[in-house]
Image (tube, rainbow, N blue to C red):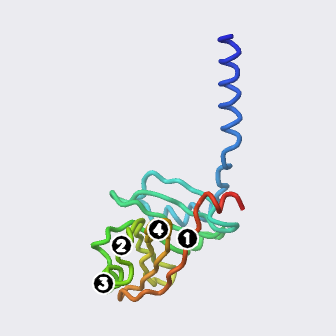
Amino acid sequence: MKKLISVMVCLTFIACSYAQKPKADVPVAAKTAFAAKYPAAQKVKWSVEKPGEFEVEFTLGKVESSALFDTSGKFLESEIEIRQSELPQMAKTVISKDFAGFKIDEIEKSTDSKGITSYEMEAVKGKEKLELVFDVAGKLLSQKPVEDKEKEDKK
């Protein structure tokens, strides 16, 4: 009986490991561009953002960061985690006025390939979950509902 249980546990483990997402086959050009742009990066982990775009998550100093590169190695965007206190004052004012009662989470400072910076975050109140995007002056650029991860996975 113990052997049967051991075999079942092993088979379950093997089946689960094969069911996981395959590792991203990251083009050399993307890896090279990343290494040149972020030579001090640590804890590097690559994944496929969408076909032709590769996201790399890493730590720079003690800051959680990510960057996006295409197959040719072109830099598309970077994101770093920040605290709410680091947002522009106008953004903090809009949040306290228009999103009172919402919990602000996952705040990121995003910079695209042209050097344009924005601030992206989630605002949660009960079952309502929004993605908010502000510009550097603190003006609200967009506000859209965020689908539940479980709902997205079922699609």
CA neighbours of label 3 inside 10 A, class few (<14), some (14 to 19), many (20+): some
The image quarter in which residue 70 lies: bottom right
The span from disc 1 to disc 2 (Cα, nearest Å) is 17 Å
Q: Nearer the viewer, mark 2 or mark 4?
A: 2
First-in-chain label (2 vs 4): 4
Q: Quadrant of the C terminus?
A: bottom right
- Answer whether labels 1 and 2 touch (C-beta < 8 Å): no
- In the image, residue 75 sits, relative to residue 40, either above or below, namely below
* Numbered marks: total: 4
Tell me the amino acid under the disc marked 3. Answer: Thr
Q: Quadrant of residue 61?
A: bottom left
Residue at 64% x, 68% y: name it. 53
- Callout 4 crowding tier (Cα within 10 Å): few <14, some 14–19, many ≥20: few
Label whose residue precedes the other's in the sequence (1 or 2): 2
Give the alpha-carbon distance from disc 4 to disc 3, as whole Å. Answer: 34 Å
Q: Amino acid at mark 1?
A: Val
In the image, 13: left or right of 68?
right
x, y percent for residue 59? 41, 57
Label at residue 146: 1
Residue labelled with disc 2 = 101
Of the numbered discs 3 and 2, the one sitting upstream in the chain is: 3
What is the number of the mark on residue 93?
3
Residue 143 appears at what percent x and percent y?
A: 50, 81
First reached walking from the N terminus: tag 4 or tag 3: 4
Frontmost residue, 49 versus 70: 49
The numbered disc on residue 37 is 4
